[in-house]
Protein backbone atom coordinates (compact mmCIF):
# COMPACT_ATOMS: atom_id res chain seq x y z
CA UNK A 1 0.00 0.00 0.00
CA UNK A 2 2.93 2.33 0.74
CA UNK A 3 4.35 1.74 -2.69
CA UNK A 4 1.06 2.62 -4.34
CA UNK A 5 0.78 5.89 -2.43
CA UNK A 6 4.40 6.81 -3.03
CA UNK A 7 4.10 5.97 -6.72
CA UNK A 8 1.01 8.15 -7.09
CA UNK A 9 2.74 11.01 -5.26
CA UNK A 10 5.73 10.68 -7.58
CA UNK A 11 3.46 10.82 -10.62
CA UNK A 12 1.75 13.92 -9.23
CA UNK A 13 5.05 15.64 -8.52
CA UNK A 14 6.31 14.81 -11.97
CA UNK A 15 3.13 16.12 -13.53
CA UNK A 16 3.40 19.44 -11.66
CA UNK A 17 7.04 19.94 -12.46
CA UNK A 18 6.48 19.54 -16.16
CA UNK A 19 8.34 22.26 -18.04
CA UNK A 20 8.46 23.39 -21.63
CA UNK A 21 11.89 21.95 -22.24
CA UNK A 22 11.81 18.99 -24.50
CA UNK A 23 14.52 17.18 -22.62
CA UNK A 24 12.80 17.78 -19.34
CA UNK A 25 9.53 16.70 -20.91
CA UNK A 26 11.12 13.46 -22.14
CA UNK A 27 12.63 12.86 -18.73
CA UNK A 28 9.29 13.54 -17.12
CA UNK A 29 7.61 11.16 -19.57
CA UNK A 30 10.16 8.48 -18.79
CA UNK A 31 9.72 9.10 -15.08
CA UNK A 32 5.95 8.89 -15.47
CA UNK A 33 6.28 5.68 -17.40
CA UNK A 34 8.59 4.26 -14.73
CA UNK A 35 6.19 5.40 -12.02
CA UNK A 36 3.29 3.79 -13.89
CA UNK A 37 5.23 0.55 -14.25
CA UNK A 38 6.18 0.66 -10.56
CA UNK A 39 2.56 1.31 -9.63
CA UNK A 40 1.43 -1.60 -11.82
CA UNK A 41 4.05 -3.86 -10.25
CA UNK A 42 3.04 -2.75 -6.76
CA UNK A 43 -0.62 -3.40 -7.53
CA UNK A 44 0.22 -6.80 -8.96
CA UNK A 45 2.30 -7.66 -5.85
CA UNK A 46 -0.53 -6.48 -3.62
CA UNK A 47 -3.01 -8.63 -5.59
CA UNK A 48 -0.74 -11.66 -5.26
CA UNK A 49 -0.37 -11.05 -1.53
CA UNK A 50 -4.15 -10.74 -1.14
CA UNK A 51 -4.69 -13.89 -3.18
CA UNK A 52 -2.16 -15.80 -1.04
CA UNK A 53 -3.83 -14.51 2.13
CA UNK A 54 -7.27 -15.53 0.88
CA UNK A 55 -5.96 -18.98 -0.09
CA UNK A 56 -4.32 -19.43 3.34
CA UNK A 57 -7.49 -18.27 5.09
CA UNK A 58 -9.61 -20.65 2.98
CA UNK A 59 -7.34 -23.56 3.85
CA UNK A 60 -7.44 -22.62 7.53
CA UNK A 61 -11.25 -22.48 7.41
CA UNK A 62 -11.42 -25.86 5.65
CA UNK A 63 -9.06 -27.37 8.24
CA UNK A 64 -11.15 -25.92 11.07
CA UNK A 65 -14.36 -27.27 9.54
CA UNK A 66 -12.75 -30.71 9.06
CA UNK A 67 -11.53 -30.71 12.68
CA UNK A 68 -14.98 -29.68 13.93
CA UNK A 69 -16.59 -32.43 11.83
CA UNK A 70 -14.14 -35.01 13.20
CA UNK A 71 -14.80 -33.85 16.76
CA UNK A 72 -18.56 -34.04 16.15
CA UNK A 73 -18.24 -37.58 14.74
CA UNK A 74 -16.14 -38.63 17.74
CA UNK A 75 -18.71 -37.14 20.11
CA UNK A 76 -21.55 -38.91 18.32
CA UNK A 77 -19.63 -42.21 18.41
CA UNK A 78 -18.97 -41.78 22.14
CA UNK A 79 -22.64 -40.97 22.76
CA UNK A 80 -23.71 -44.05 20.78
CA UNK A 81 -21.34 -46.23 22.78
CA UNK A 82 -22.64 -44.76 26.03
CA UNK A 83 -26.21 -45.50 24.94
CA UNK A 84 -25.25 -49.07 24.02
CA UNK A 85 -23.56 -49.49 27.41
CA UNK A 86 -26.63 -48.13 29.18
CA UNK A 87 -28.87 -50.46 27.18
CA UNK A 88 -26.68 -53.43 28.05
CA UNK A 89 -26.58 -52.45 31.72
CA UNK A 90 -30.37 -52.07 31.77
CA UNK A 91 -30.80 -55.46 30.12
CA UNK A 92 -28.41 -57.02 32.65
CA UNK A 93 -30.32 -55.40 35.51
CA UNK A 94 -33.64 -56.71 34.16
CA UNK A 95 -32.17 -60.18 33.74
CA UNK A 96 -30.77 -60.07 37.28
CA UNK A 97 -34.13 -58.92 38.63
CA UNK A 98 -35.91 -61.75 36.77
CA UNK A 99 -33.39 -64.26 38.06
CA UNK A 100 -33.72 -62.90 41.59
CA UNK A 101 -37.53 -63.06 41.40
CA UNK A 102 -37.39 -66.63 40.09
CA UNK A 103 -34.96 -67.62 42.85
CA UNK A 104 -37.21 -65.99 45.46
CA UNK A 105 -40.30 -67.73 44.04
CA UNK A 106 -38.48 -71.05 44.12
CA UNK A 107 -37.38 -70.42 47.71
CA UNK A 108 -40.98 -69.59 48.72
CA UNK A 109 -42.23 -72.70 46.93
CA UNK A 110 -39.62 -74.86 48.65
CA UNK A 111 -40.49 -73.33 52.03
CA UNK A 112 -44.20 -73.93 51.42
CA UNK A 113 -43.54 -77.53 50.38
CA UNK A 114 -41.40 -78.05 53.47
CA UNK A 115 -44.13 -76.55 55.64
CA UNK A 116 -46.74 -78.86 54.03
CA UNK A 117 -44.47 -81.89 54.51
CA UNK A 118 -43.84 -80.83 58.10
CA UNK A 119 -47.57 -80.39 58.69
CA UNK A 120 -48.28 -83.82 57.12
CA UNK A 121 -45.65 -85.43 59.29
CA UNK A 122 -46.92 -83.65 62.37
CA UNK A 123 -50.48 -84.74 61.50
CA UNK A 124 -49.37 -88.32 60.91
CA UNK A 125 -47.40 -88.30 64.16
CA UNK A 126 -50.43 -86.87 66.00
CA UNK A 127 -52.72 -89.55 64.51
CA UNK A 128 -50.21 -92.24 65.39
CA UNK A 129 -49.84 -90.85 68.90
CA UNK A 130 -53.64 -90.68 69.26
CA UNK A 131 -53.99 -94.26 68.00
CA UNK A 132 -51.31 -95.43 70.40
CA UNK A 133 -52.89 -93.50 73.26
CA UNK A 134 -56.29 -94.96 72.31
CA UNK A 135 -54.88 -98.46 72.09
CA UNK A 136 -53.04 -98.02 75.39
CA UNK A 137 -56.22 -96.73 77.02
CA UNK A 138 -58.22 -99.63 75.54
CA UNK A 139 -55.60 -102.09 76.73
CA UNK A 140 -55.62 -100.62 80.26
CA UNK A 141 -59.39 -100.68 80.32
CA UNK A 142 -59.43 -104.28 79.15
CA UNK A 143 -56.82 -105.21 81.74
CA UNK A 144 -58.92 -103.57 84.47
CA UNK A 145 -62.02 -105.37 83.28
CA UNK A 146 -60.15 -108.68 83.34
CA UNK A 147 -58.71 -107.98 86.73
CA UNK A 148 -62.05 -107.48 88.31
Image (spheres, rainbow, N blue to C red):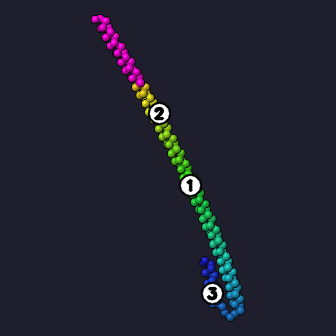
Mark 1 lies on residue: 76
| Residue 135 image point, x, y percent | 36, 13
At a point 48% along the width and 40% down the height, the residue shown is 97
Q: Could you tell which of marks 2 and 1 lies nearer the N-terminus? A: 1
Q: Where residue 106 is drawn, which disc sits there?
A: 2
Is residue 27 visible from the viewing direction of this image? Answer: no
Q: How far apart are marks 3 and 1 (CA)?
A: 64 Å
Q: Are marks 3 and 2 in contact (CB under 8 Å)?
A: no
| SS under mark 2 | helix
At a point 51% along the width and 42% down the height, the residue shown is 92
Mark 3 lies on residue: 12
Q: With respect to residue 113, does 69 lie above or below?
A: below
At a point 57% along the width and 57% down the height, the residue shown is 72
Q: Is residue 58 left or right of residue 116?
A: right
Give the mark toward the camera: 3 or 2: 2
Residue furthest toward the top?
147
Count residues near mark 1 (Cα–Cα under 10 Å), then give few for <14, some for 14-19, many for 20+. few
Count residues near mark 3 (Cα–Cα under 10 Å), then give few for <14, some for 14-19, many for 20+. few
In depth, the one of 4 and 91 nearer the eye is: 91
Q: Could you tell which of marks 3 and 1 lies nearer the N-terminus? A: 3
Q: Distance between the residues labelled 2 and 1?
A: 45 Å
Which quadrant of the rendered structure holds the N terminus?
bottom right
Q: Are marks 3 and 1 in contact (CB under 8 Å)?
A: no
| SS under mark 1 | helix
Region of the chain picked out in magenta, as a range: 120-148
Q: With respect to residue 78, does 11 lie above or below?
A: below
Q: Residue 144: within the magenta?
A: yes
Amino acid sequence: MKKVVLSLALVAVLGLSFTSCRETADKAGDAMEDATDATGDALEDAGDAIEDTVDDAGEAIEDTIDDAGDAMEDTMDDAGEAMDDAKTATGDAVDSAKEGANDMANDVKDAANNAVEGAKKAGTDAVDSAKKAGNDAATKAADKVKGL
